[in-house]
Image: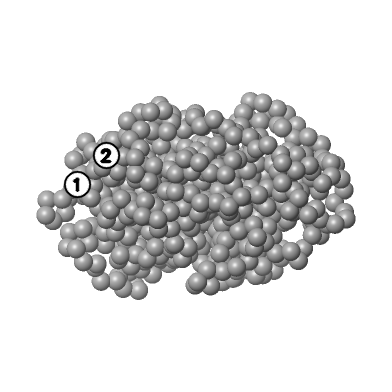
Amino acid sequence: MKTPTSSKGQLTTSLRLICAAVVAASTLAACGGGGGGGGGGGGQIGVNPPTNPPVTPTPTNPAPYTPGQANTGADPDVTTLGNAFDTYWNYCETPRTGTDPYTGKAYPDKKGSLRDELTFLRAWTHQYYLWYNEIPTDFKMSDFTDPVAYFDKLKTPLTTASGAPKDKFHFTYDSDEWDKLSTEGIELGYGVTWTSSGATAPRIWNATIVEEGSPAALAGLKRGDRLTVVDGVDFINATDEASVAKINAGLFPAAANETHSFTVTRGATSIPVTLAAKEVTAKSVKNVKTFDIAGGRRVGYLTFENHNAVAERQLIDAFNTLKTANVNDLVIDMRYNGGGLLYVAAELAYMVAGPTSNGKVFESLSYNGKVQTDASDTVRFAPTAYGFEAPNAVAKGAALPTLSLPRVTILTTEGTCSASEAVINALRGVDVQVDVVGSQTCGKPYGFTPVPNCGTTYFSIEFKGVNAKGYGDYADGFAPTCRVADDLSHELGDKDEALLAAALSHRATGTCPATPSATAMSLAQPKTLVRKNVSELKIYSRPR
């Protein structure tokens, strides 16, 4: 794939994400959604990976006008834009000054105009967006005063066979925040992830993940706690503009040490807490343990929440632990994993499948027909680590531990997206039996390369992926082998938690357990994850 030069270095094929940012009216994961997964979110890496030389496109057509033009007049003819995105890249209405903390170099921004930022987005979309020829034409640049609002329109309005939006994964991030999140797992907030029934009232949000050592954990918040009040506002029912603005300000703090008050309910108990925002480092891999079940089987288990750069080391350490424990079966809990780096997903799949998968197709990527492709557009199962730049990084070429399993169980919800789904699809493509326990996954056989411009990183679908058997038609998600609702009344990794208990039972008996009663699952809430305040992911006082 021919990708342009990024202000964060070179955007090479290794940076491809199939992250989902877990996009819906109030989510983040993952990617991207991606994914992704977040966002949006999910994770990729925002610094130079250690290999793959960059390929810089050569402009083929002159730009229709020079940088600095006011946002007036007719739109440029997209068929003549060619690689104009390269001409307009980093021309900003309000250029940043100073040093980029992730590159150690001055920001690449140059003085330009709003029109330059919009032209960059339109040209880049026309060249790389997978469904570029489905973008509506009933709007023009001069209608917009904000690049993100314009970017929101640069996507297909079509739907899938089920009636869901074809592109659910179109989102943005503040570039500095994205670099911290994708490279180191650092995110400004309270360290709590919510599962959400939606952004509009009545809102039912429950805590799903509380990061160890975070402000939320130190205040005593627990998985399953239900949010009821934010800074004195009725979170569940408020609809007026002022109340909604107050809720957003409390849920998504803008600066470290910003303090807000919340009330949650736990059963019949109402619990007030005050939280001060900080930059929280979230672990991607947790709860590595084993369970012995009938038939002499030792089942390994881990929760995996983000395919980001730091996950590479954490996954390798986890698989070394499980290999030492002599596990002969495995449950991977990806119920809240919205996606991320495709190469991390390929490493995970290899560690499950082992040497018999070496060299086989993990995922082949197809583009919009205008993008030149080569051998690097096929990601393969490989026995060595990529070596992403991250704290406690793995050496490039380090041997990956393997369990060499003929089957694996993956725990899922609607928050399981993108790179997580690619693991399911790729393993099935090399004849590893994958049992899915939980609920339908999000449905994202697509990916993108994050592209930063003027302080915003944009995520726009660029490719579709298929496995070694040529299959990639899961835009409506993977159906579960055993359908089980998420259980917020137990901690992740607890053998009595509904999804894990069902997986262990299915492994022992070969049959799916009976669906738990409504009473037993009363705390379970499906739908989306909420971690960050991205433009698409806020709470709104009325439907958009």
Depth order, front residue of 453/126: 126
Compared to residue 182, the image places residue 228 above or below, namely below
Secondary structure found at label 2: helix
Q: In this view, does 242 lie to the left or right of 411?
A: right
Q: Residue 132: x, y in percent?
A: 64, 57
Residue 403's spot in the image, x, y percent?
A: 24, 42
Q: Which residue is drawn at 52% across and 68% down?
A: 160
For this rendering, which residue is in front, 377 or 268? Answer: 377
Residue under pointer 1:
328
Question: How far separated are the C-alphas under marks 2 and 1?
Answer: 16 Å
Instruction: Mark 2 and mark 1 in contact? Answer it, CB < 8 Å.
Output: no
Identify the residue at image location x=51%, y=46%: 17
Q: Which residue is drawn at 87% across and 54% down?
A: 72
The residue at the point 47 percent across, 37 percent down is 309
In the visual, does 524 lie left or right of 118? left
Local SS, label 1? loop
The answer to whether residue 102 is seen in the rendering is yes
In the depicted structure, whether residue 222 falls above or below residue 524? above
State which mark lies toward you, 2 or 1.
2
Q: Name the residue under label 2.
A: 355
